[in-house]
Image: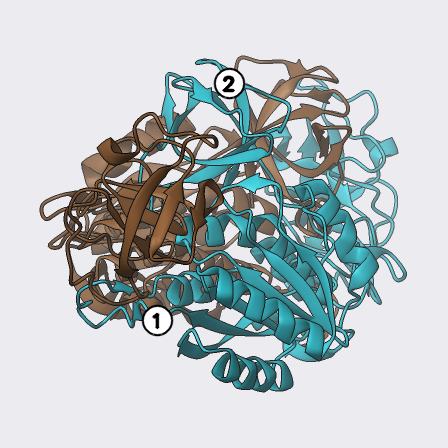
Chain colours: A cyan, B brown
Amino acid sequence: MLEVKTPAEVLAMIPKEFRPLGETETVSYTEAAGRVLAEDIIAEEYVPDFDRSTVDGYACRAADTFGCSDAIPAILELKGEVLMGQDADFSLSRDACAYVPTGGAIPRGADCAVMIEYTEDYGDGTVGILKPGAPGMNLIFRGDDVYPGKPILKAGRVLTSQDVGALAAVGKTAVSVSRRVKVGILSTGDELVPPDETPGPGRVRDVNTPLLTAMLRDFGAEPVGYGIVADDEALLRVKLRQAAGECDAVILSGGSSVGVKDAACRIIEEMGELLLHGIAVKPGKPAILGKAGAKPLIGLPGHPVAACFVTQLFVLPLLGRLMGRTQEDLTVTAELTESVGANHGREQITACRLRREGGRLLAAPIRSKAGLITQLAGADGYFLIKRDCEGLPKGAQIQVYPY
Amino acid sequence: MLEVKTPAEVLAMIPKEFRPLGETETVSYTEAAGRVLAEDIIAEEYVPDFDRSTVDGYACRAADTFGCSDAIPAILELKGEVLMGQDADFSLSRDACAYVPTGGAIPRGADCAVMIEYTEDYGDGTVGILKPGAPGMNLIFRGDDVYPGKPILKAGRVLTSQDVGALAAVGKTAVSVSRRVKVGILSTGDELVPPDETPGPGRVRDVNTPLLTAMLRDFGAEPVGYGIVADDEALLRVKLRQAAGECDAVILSGGSSVGVKDAACRIIEEMGELLLHGIAVKPGKPAILGKAGAKPLIGLPGHPVAACFVTQLFVLPLLGRLMGRTQEDLTVTAELTESVGANHGREQITACRLRREGGRLLAAPIRSKAGLITQLAGADGYFLIKRDCEGLPKGAQIQVYPY
């Protein structure tokens, strides 16, 4: 008989029992945001590839300007103008300068740029410098930002829009990313009807299929729907085997009756190994985790709120593991607007709404008896209360996992 | 001459100068995640539509079980079994019970459900109840979760995966969302080459087009690329007018030379009205905001880091306004790993990396002279230092805007 495990024990189990799929694909950098990077990105070029000015002004040798002032300008010979996007194809000797735009190349011989505000063009081929320069002033040197061999991004990172910009900058226009993990989704239950049907007596709509589909898609996985399966062991076996054959992982949700839960466990044991039957968390206890070969087979509670929490808690980290994702989710610190009780002998998850008020972030716990829609709709995130904690007072600082 | 405005002044200007487009489209609830809801969602049905049990056990009248115990069970007549997904088409009289699965319908006459653990089936058509029930115990009544007229979601919200679940639950399979705002993106600069080309002398790759495209797409807008435009006023005028004609907003970035900035301002004034020329923030000062009719025309700094910050700071809120988005971005509280100086007479934006260490969230500011790629790649967010603050010490608690 498998023991019920705590959320921490379940999370610790994931890296031991499952390995990254190790399958990658090459995508254009413009399509890479949100994907898990599968290679370390190392620069192969200098960025910039030339010395640049960071100001509009005059490039010159700093030493020629030492000691100058408004009263006694340094008079330099104007040798020319660097055009934007052009090479500076001349060099500066002593007491000479050249006009450079912001981002323009610096002629050889120059070691600083003086802002145009501190100069005066006398119109006779000379320019007065009113404030002394210093070597390196207002310049970016070749490779200051990036040079060949410089690490840019690490494998395992979920690429942001900003990373896409960085990839563009170094000319890395094709990147290797982890293949999206393909996840089969089955909802079981004789009471379920598709959301576009009106439920008859004793029936309810299947919420878990669209909920999990949206959550997985948002996470960068590829959900594959296998529809609603009746509470029938033979049928469940056929569907589970089909999904496991076609996907990298399978999530079965529902089967609120004891019989279906037991059937799911039996089928998983036939197909491979049952790793876990029950997580000590409320809501969400009746979760199942097994594997067929390297493929995770996951059983979630039928109640959508519990299914959602368990997915956040361990299914997404597990799918992240399969995709080689190394990134952690962030939490936001918020202040509880009212006290929340907890004394269940297991960790408790509570959904909340977040709002900002006078610089403070407030978390209003969502309470409801039935808690189906009201716990999901309009919720901004959730927080955990530890097993050994009897509740949290109003005003407590909590860590909220935002949706 | 327009004054330079503070970030707060710019944000305050947005709702005054721009209005929601008010254009909506109907999408399937399965495609609604990430979209801005354009209608209030009000329930039209009861969820659940029948009284349900929350446990596997026996439905009965609580009064018949008062005073019972392990030693003296209440003996009830077993009237039948409710099947999952079926109506409970019988009613219970006094001293009777019926088996119900979790989520199953409750027969008329019953007012509680006793968990199977506290019962004993004697196999002779009677069941012993070992623990007294109470009216309402382990039941969800019709409409407990949702009833006709109950507000579910408010217009202006960016729909989450959880909201999609809630829409499924109430059978709202088609929803009205704001049309994605179409935003033209132009990069100007004679020095720019497309990212897939190797820059020649004096040239650099166009980072802003892919960066802004990714940021806008992630925000739920529809970016439209107009490519790289040379520093030429006539050409810029043609392209800007074309983009403004075809899109809801236009972002022009670059034009680091003073001439192009002035040209952009002149063109915007010809097309409509210049609202702002410069934001008191570092980096990012040379930002332009204007409008042609109701359409915003935005000029961003050419430096990608500055362009990124200004986009976060006011372009995304402005696009959110056009889409009727009412939601605020969240910040995370983190602890600075080292001191950061600031004394520029304007707000300073600094990118940072986030990591968790022993329960604390640490923010490591990213320093770099050139700061192009190194400020973008691998950054997890950014934070602001107020204008009147001379810097932040190591260990300071800061609010980070995560990417």
Q: Position of residue B189 (x, y in %)?
A: 54, 62
In this image, B184 relative to B334: left or right? Answer: left
* Residue at 75% over, 56% down: A14
For residue B386, say whether it is visible.
no
Q: Is residue B285 above or below residue A32?
A: above
Q: Chain of mark 1?
A: A
Indicate which disc residue B337 carries: none
Q: Position of residue A252 (x, y in %)?
A: 52, 68
In this image, A103 relative to A243: left or right? Answer: right
* Amino acid at the residue labelled 2: Leu
Q: Which image quarter: residue B246?
A: bottom left
Q: Is residue A51 above or below residue A203?
A: above
* Residue at 32% over, 63% down: B32
User: Along the line of sight, which residue is nearer the eye, A35 or A121?
Assistant: A35
Helix, strand or loop status at disc 2? strand
Assign the N terminus of chain A to one quadrant of the image. bottom right
Which residue, given by chain and number where applicable, does mark 2 sit on? Answer: A392
Q: Which image quarter: residue B267?
A: bottom left
In this image, B364 relative to B306: left or right? Answer: right
Which residue, given by chain and number where applicable, does mark 1 sit on? Answer: A190
> Dot 2, how many residues are within 10 Å of its Cα: few (below 14), some (14-19), or many (20+)?
some
Q: Position of residue A312 (x, y in %)?
A: 55, 50
